[in-house]
Image (cartoon, grey):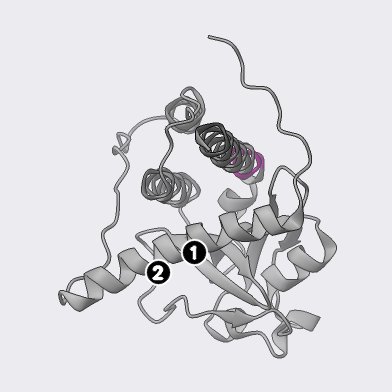
Amino acid sequence: SRQAARPQRRPQAEDDRQQDRVGQEAAGQRGAAQGRGQEPRRVHSDAVPLGASLHARLACFIFRFLRRPLDLSIETALLLERWQGIVNSMAQVAEVPCVLINRLDKNEICQAVGSVSVPTFYCGEPVPLALNTYCSQVISSNQPLLVENAIGTRYENNNPTFAAGFSYYYGLPLLWPSGKTFGTLCMLDFSSPDRASQHCSLLTLFKQAIEYDLQMLQQQQDLLKREQQADK
């Protein structure tokens, strides 16, 4: 099949509308589940045999999520399901309690999806961008951030993520095709596990997969717009 052409740089207003759709869909799913007295639906990835080698486990997850690019029929709900599988798989492979995809909503950082192992006390409420969080630093610098042990560092203060017990953090910025910030992809732990740092390169691969999804979402909306204009 013909490879999709890389979209041209879009105005910020287009990215803002796309980001609102993703955020509203995620909030709607959580609200509907809570209204029924249920926990929000989680999409579990296929389990990898516990006895599998590290390299075998990595190969399995990379193959599962990167071999099948999304097409232009992508729906936001399916996008969130795909991302749910990514964070669940990353948490399982790296053996960390928390992997998140966050989105930037004006001046707040909101959780789009979180791994099934996220502690219940980490409720995922919107966090003001002005606070001294790890993700705020990633967004402001547009650069990866690795904090192996936040104790005794600047991240001890005014940081609700550190207050929740997470002293280890590795996060990457997520960008729209235009280069505008969508949010962050990050993994957290209560200590500094050597095993987590070994998987930073895998998190980078998942970042590329998520940004490709954003590109496909943008292309879908561009296609729908052209069809609507043609019908007029």
Q: Is label 2 in a helix, a strand or a loop?
A: helix
Q: In this picture, is 224 found above or below 90? A: above
Decide if residue 218 is on the left or right side of residue 131.
left
Q: Residues within 10 Å of mark 2 (few under 14, many from 20)?
A: some
Residue extent of the magenta highlight? 201-206
| Residue type at tag 2 | Ala
Q: Is residue 87 visible?
A: yes
Label 2 sits on residue: 27
Residue at horizontal 50 percent and vertical 68 percent from the top: 111
| Residue type at tag 1 | Gly
Prevailing SS of the magenta stretch: helix
Label 1 sits on residue: 23
Q: In this picture, is 105 found above or below 72? A: below
Which quadrant of the structure image shows residue 34?
A: bottom left
Q: Residues within 10 Å of mark 1 (few under 14, many from 20)?
A: many
View extreme (top): residue: 1
Are dots 2 and 1 in contact, CB under 8 Å? Answer: yes
- Residue 8: give x, y in percent of width and height: 77, 35
- Residue 76: give x, y in percent of width and height: 43, 48
Q: Is residue 153 visible?
A: no
Indicate whether residue 1 is drawn in magenta: no
